[in-house]
Image (cartoon, grey):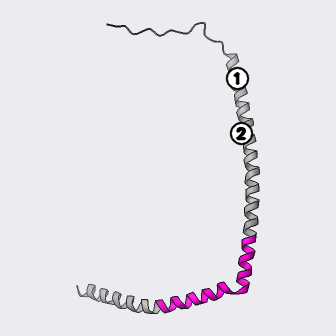
């Protein structure tokens, strides 16, 4: 029980000290990040990145459109080929001379 109480007391003290020091450190990091974000070279790099990303999106859309057309053409050709093969197989089969007629159920 004594170890449990000591552990809890240590955790509370660590938490209080950590939050005080942590808040100051957080504020320092926040200020540093803000200075980096506002730096002109970082701003130029961000603009350049946005332009390149936009160009990549346009290129990807074009490639996707071309790919879609190519896939559609290949699938259509494959379906036409299968239909032709199925029709050829149907012509080879001779139909039955008669079709069996199911019997009507008896009424009692």
The residue that mark 2 highlights is 75
Residue 22 vs 72, above or below: the answer is below
- Under tag 2, what secondary structure? helix
Instruction: Tell me the quarter of the picture where residue 52 sits.
Output: bottom right
**Which residue occupies the foreground of this view, 93 or 67?**
67
Q: Earlier in the sequence, mark 2 or mark 1?
A: 2
The residue that mark 1 highlights is 87
Residue 101: where, in percent of width, then height? 50, 9
Neighbours of disc 2 within 10 Å: few (<14), some (14-19), many (20+):
few
Q: Going 35% across and 87% down the picture, which residue do you hit?
A: 11
**Which residue occupies the foreground of this view, 41 or 1?**
41
- Mark 2 and 1 residues: CB-CB less than 8 Å, in contact? no
Residue 17: where, in percent of width, then height? 40, 92
Residue 45 vs 105, above or below: the answer is below
Residue 48: where, in percent of width, then height? 75, 75
* Numbered label tally: 2
CA gap, disc 2 to disc 1? 18 Å
Residue 48 vs 76, above or below: the answer is below
Question: Is 85 within the magenta?
Answer: no
Q: Going 44% across and 8% down the picture, which residue do you hit?
A: 103
Locate the C terminus by quadrant.
top left
The circle drawn on residue 29 is none
Question: Is 33 within the magenta?
Answer: yes
| 37 left or right, relative to 55 | left
The region drawn magenta spans 23-51
């Amino acid at each position: 029980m004594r170890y449990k109480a000591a552990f809890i007391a240590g955790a509370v003290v660590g938490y209080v000290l950590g939050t005080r020091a942590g808040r100051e450190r957080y504020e320092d990091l926040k200020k540093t990040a803000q200075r980096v974000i506002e730096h002109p070279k970082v701003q130029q790099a961000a603009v350049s990145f946005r332009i390149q990303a936009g160009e990549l999106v346009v290129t990807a859309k074009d490639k996707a459109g071309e790919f879609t057309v190519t896939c559609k053409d290949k699938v259509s050709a494959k379906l036409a080929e299968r239909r032709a093969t199925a029709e050829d197989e149907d012509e080879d089969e001779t139909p039955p001379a008669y079709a069996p007629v199911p019997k009507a159920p008896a009424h009692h």
